[in-house]
Amino acid sequence: MKLIGTSLIVLCIVLSNSLHAQKNSAAYQQWKKEYDERIQKEYLFDVYIPEDMGDAFLQLNKLIDADSKAKFKAAAEEEAVHKLHFSLGRWIIYNWQFYDGSRLSHSLKQLNIHHPDDMARVLIRSYHRYLNKVPLDIKQQVEAIEARKQKEREERMKARIDSSLVKGKN
């Protein structure tokens, strides 16, 4: 009798996982179809989407007034990136559709920049460098993102280990 009960539970779990996988597969297929359409579009929600980073610079030149651009250009790079992340960066992420996908976000993913916040930071930093005629050095920027993420993973792991050790002592 116990064997039948255990088998029934295993069967329910397998069927549940199978149905869940099919549901996720259909949802993924729908998302992928929409994503593939979005990354081809020049406009999303009546907003022009730059094709690549160079096009983004041209659009930012049009969108940002001369005084603001001069202040941005004169600021230290780290200060400019930090200060503008939650204003210009949020505008870029939202209007250029980094979360749902756009031709610009897709272009940045091809450079191995995947998270919308990282995309915005790279664009802001690169635009600052572009205005100051400094090499963009995208490879170095991507390596810095990867190093920061690795450090964050290591810190989270250390915190988990420390937490486990503290719990084990009690």
Image (cartoon, rainbow, N blue to C red):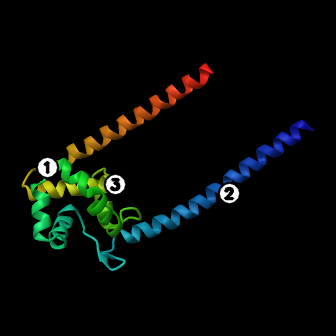
**As drawn, 165 above or below 9:** above
Q: Nearer the viewer, mark 3 or mark 2?
A: 3
Which residue is nearer to you in this view: 45 or 26?
45
Of the image marks 1 and 3, the number of the one nearer the N terminus: 1
The reply, left or right, for residue 21 in relation to residue 48 is right
Q: Amino acid at mark 2?
A: Leu
Q: Report how far apart the C-alphas of labels 1 and 3 lie in the structure.
A: 20 Å
The dot on residue 19 is: 2
Quadrant in which the C terminus appears = top right
The reply, left or right, for residue 96 in relation to residue 23 is left
Quadrant in which the N terminus appears = top right
Q: Residue at x 19, y 50 (%)?
A: 79
Q: Residue at x 32, y 39 (%)?
A: 148
- Provide residue 97's location: percent of width, then percent of height: 36, 67
Q: Nearer the viewer, mark 2 or mark 1?
A: 1
**As drawn, 129 above or below 155:** below
Q: Residue at x 49, y 65 (%)?
A: 31
Q: Label 1: few (<14), some or many (≥20) within 10 Å?
A: few
Q: Label 3: few (<14), some or many (≥20) within 10 Å?
A: some
In the picture of the structure, the residue carrying the numbered disc 1 is 76
Q: Report how far apart the C-alphas of labels 3 and 2 lie in the structure.
A: 34 Å
In the picture of the structure, the residue carrying the numbered disc 3 is 117
